[in-house]
Amino acid sequence: MERLEKYLVKYCSPTLASLKTANLFSCPKNLLPGLEGSLECWNLCMREKGVKLCLLKKKGSVLVYVYRPGKLKHDLSEPEAKQILMDYGYSTKEEEGAIARLRERLGQGGDFPHEIGLFLGYPPGDVKGFIRYGGRCCKCTGCWKVYGDEVKAKRAFAMFERCQKAYLRLWQEGESIMQLTMAVPQD
């Protein structure tokens, strides 16, 4: 359980702080024994905070997705995001169905589904630019490659980094994940 907490603090602080729609992390299966049971427990605890955790991928290494359903629903409803998702066979408007389709795409092998950026709260224009240019010709790089508003993105990158450092320090000083997670009611 402590290892999972460390991953949550290290990789998901901006989501826990409600600064970002979602984060994800990958790790070898053997590093987090009993992960599925742990995720169930965490989901029960985090429900009141407006946070969900789920496995996106279990083969080889695991890919854990930590998200705020209300924010995800909002992000995926933006017209540009909806169009990108439609282009990749996402037919549902509900976030749970979209996550199921993303999980399916991850399981297909081949190219990594770059529309995953929409599920992480990246601006649709940046996701579209990444897909279009194959990751080349971006204005700057941080948590994602930026093709649109560079100034806004750099501010977000700095904020996420400050959040991660503060959360790591607070967690190491004894704050629990529940204490560090901002409560935001779900829609």
Image: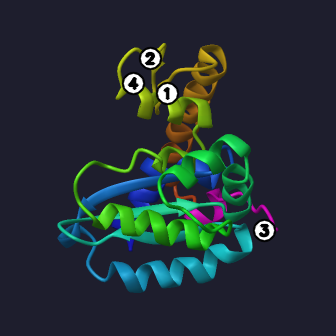
- Tell me where residue 18 appears, x and y as whole percent: 69, 50
Determine whether label 1 and label 4 are within 8 Å by CB: yes
Determine the CA span between mark 2 and mark 3. 34 Å
Which SS class for mark 4? helix
| Quadrant for the N terminus in the image | bottom left
The answer to whether 130 is drawn above or below residue 121 in the figure is above
First reached walking from the N terminus: tag 3 or tag 1: 1
Q: Disc 4 designates what residue?
A: 133
Query: What is the number of the mark on residue 23?
Result: none
Determine the CA span between mark 1 and mark 2. 8 Å
> Which span of residues is magenta-colored?
177-187
- Tell me where residue 131 appears, x and y as whole percent: 42, 34
Residue at left offset 63%, top offset 67%: 95
First reached walking from the N terminus: tag 2 or tag 4: 4
Dot 3 amino acid type: Gln
Coloration mode: rainbow
Q: Disc 3 designates what residue?
A: 186
Q: Disc 2 designates what residue?
A: 138
Q: Is residue 117 visible?
A: yes
Residue at left offset 50%, top offset 44%: 117
Q: Nearer the viewer, residue 96 or 105?
A: 105
Dot 4 amino acid type: Tyr
Determine the CA span between mark 4 and mark 3. 35 Å
| Magenta region includes residue 182 | yes
Determine whether label 2 and label 4 are within 8 Å by CB: yes
| Quadrant for the C terminus in the image | bottom right
Which SS class for mark 3? loop
First reached walking from the N terminus: tag 1 or tag 2: 1
State whether the magenta stretch is mostly helix, strand or loop.
loop
Question: Label 1 neighbourhood size at 10 Å, few (<14), some (14-19), many (20+)?
Answer: some
Which SS class for mark 1? helix
